[in-house]
Image (tube, helix red, strand yellow):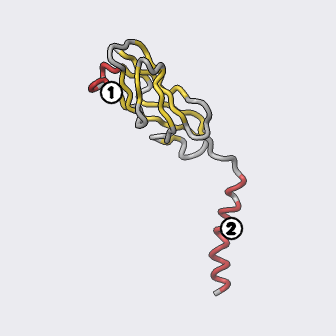
Amino acid sequence: MVLKTSLLTLPLLILTAGCGSSSPRMLQSVTADPANADAKNFPDGRVQFVPTGTYNKPPKTVTPQPVTAWLASPSTLATIDQTGVAECLPGQMGTANIQVGVAGDGPLITVAQLTCP
């Protein structure tokens, strides 16, 4: 019985021995779909942005990429909720940058633009 147990653990030891020898999986970039949106072309002017993360190792892309925060800038032009749905404020015209925060990645990243009529 001892021989069977040690033979079963040998493949695990071989598999785990190689785990620490490679570089960690790292986020390289974040994008959003749509990258450019005109609010007047969406129902009720509400645009759902979906983030995608690109990594250095498989799986190379993750959609939706988990984010810690959403921001529309300037906030006087548009708002965005924490699910990624953005809309222009009444009577405002211009372009807002859509930004996301990713855990452990420092400052917010601009991933898209929203045009307000």
Q: Rounded to the nearest whole Å, what is the CA distance between mark 1 and mark 2? A: 52 Å
Q: Position of residue 42 (x, y in %)?
A: 30, 25
If you read the primary sequence from the N terminus, does the residue marked by circle 1 or circle 2 appear first?
A: 2
Q: Which residue is mark 2?
A: 13
Q: Say what amino acid the circle numbered 1 marks.
A: Arg
Q: What label sits on residue 62 in the rendered view?
A: none
Quarter of the figure that contains the C terminus: top left
Residue type marked 2: Leu
Residue beneath the point at 33% across and 13% down: 91
Judged left or right of residue 74, residue 28 is right
Please tell me which residue is depicted at 55% across the width and 37% down the height of the picture: 102
Q: Secondary structure at mark 1?
A: loop
Examine the rendered structure and indicate whether residue 22 appears above or below residue 47.
below
Spot occupied by residue 24 in the image (x, y as percentages of width and height): 66, 47
Which label was assigned to residue 46? 1
Whole-percent x and y of residue 103? 57, 40
On screen, residue 23 above or below 110: below
115 to the left or right of 18: left
Name of the residue lying farthest toward the left: 43
